[in-house]
Image: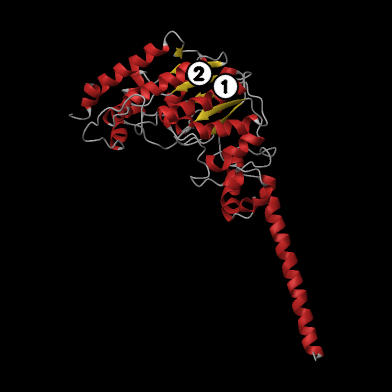
Amino acid sequence: MMNKKDASTQEQDMRFLRRFTLRTLALLAAVIGIVALFDPFYQYHAPLPGLKAVLTDKEYQCIGSLRTFDYDALIVGSSVCENYNNHWFDEGFDCTAIKAIRSYGATADLCYLLDNAYASHDLKYVFYNIDPSSLSADTEPTYESTGCPMYLYDRNLFNDYSYWLNKDVLMEKLPYMLAYSFLGDYDEGDSYNWAQWKYFGQDMATGMYARLPAVKEMQPETANAETLAGNIALLTAQVEAHPETTFKFFFSPYSMLWWDNAYRNGERDAVIYNEKQAIGALLAYDNVEIYFYQDDEEVITDLDNYMDMIHFSKDINYTVYDNLVNGRGRLTKDNYEERLERMRALSERIVREDILKYYST
């Protein structure tokens, strides 16, 4: 039989447990409320009035911004597109642009982002950078297989606790967003920009290039025919599904080191073939324009523009933008094959002459 003292102690324990539970629930509710209110990953809404759109972490923020921001144009591509300033496109094309970025720019991943954008937006323009590797990449999206936070991608509110109760979000991401909104001169147009404090120069570029000691046998140009067809189908499906959008596809100027590597790896002919096939297929559509800057000799042979084989300075981003807005470098059904063959000839000159400035053989 329980005595009065034991009963009193048990009652006190129960009161303490209730108070602890209520306080814990109140604390959790407050944390969830703060995260949902300020929403640094923009899952539920665009920035609150007075706050800037601080976009610095594409794997966590890109998908939310595509769903919740107000825009009518997208800058789509890999890491080489991160250093464009969105406001350039706003002014040059009379639109409101944001970025849809995936680091290595695989077609399936970028089309996944486009699908999410189109689910809630009508787009006037899509400025789409085609990376050569994207035409032979896997035709299935890779977000889950590469460890992206799928609770932010899947539209399932019930697993958002990984976002709400994440100490990094509360202690790092949210204060970071507030600091950049009120204390700095953060430019919202520079979303995902990584160029600040990076060094571009020939010593840096060549130092990052692991050149193969011997040249491999050149692959057949149709080496990637199956995946190429799949990736072309993904691109043309987007174009066909959205005739109201003007798609401005463009090929960025990779450095001559990249072309030397493609040659020494035996991939050069397949790269050019893939591009010819994709360009030919896309030019069949009235809402498509294609621009080609890979053969910009002045840019690609000056390694001071680069920090590695691929990544160029923000000045080159502006050059590409300026060419786009002024219609320079446009491919047509009549000239695209000639331009690609010119690129092949330039790559031959690179590996036989220009590269010898940096390597003896």
Q: Which residue is mark 1?
A: 239
The image position of residue 153, as x and y in percent, is: 60, 42
The image position of residue 143, as x and y in percent, is: 52, 42
Residue at 66% of width from left, 36% of height from top? 68
The image position of residue 184, as x and y in percent, is: 56, 39
242 over 110 or under it: above or below: above
Foreground pick, 54 / 248: 248
Q: Sequence-wise, which precedes: disc 1 or disc 2? A: 1
| In the displayed structure image, the side of residue 269 where residue 129 appears, left or right | right
User: In this rendering, does residue 131 appear at all?
Assistant: no
Three-letter code, disc 2: Leu
Residue lying furthest front? 226
Residue at 34% of width from left, 18% of height from top? 343
Three-letter code, disc 1: Val
Place residue 227 in its image quadrant.
top left
Foreground pick, 210 / 288: 288
Residue lying furthest right? 4
Foreground pick, 76 / 205: 76
Place residue 24 in its image quadrant.
bottom right
Circle 1/circle 2 CB separation < 8 Å: yes
Place residue 4 in its image quadrant.
bottom right
**Mark number, residue 282:** 2
280 over 178 or under it: above or below: above
Q: Residues within 10 Å of mark 1 (few under 14, many from 20)?
A: many
Residue at 65% of width from left, 35% of height from top? 67
Q: CA distance from mark 1 to mark 2?
A: 8 Å
Q: Quadrant of the C terminus?
A: top left
| In the displayed structure image, the side of residue 41 where residue 144 appears, left or right | left
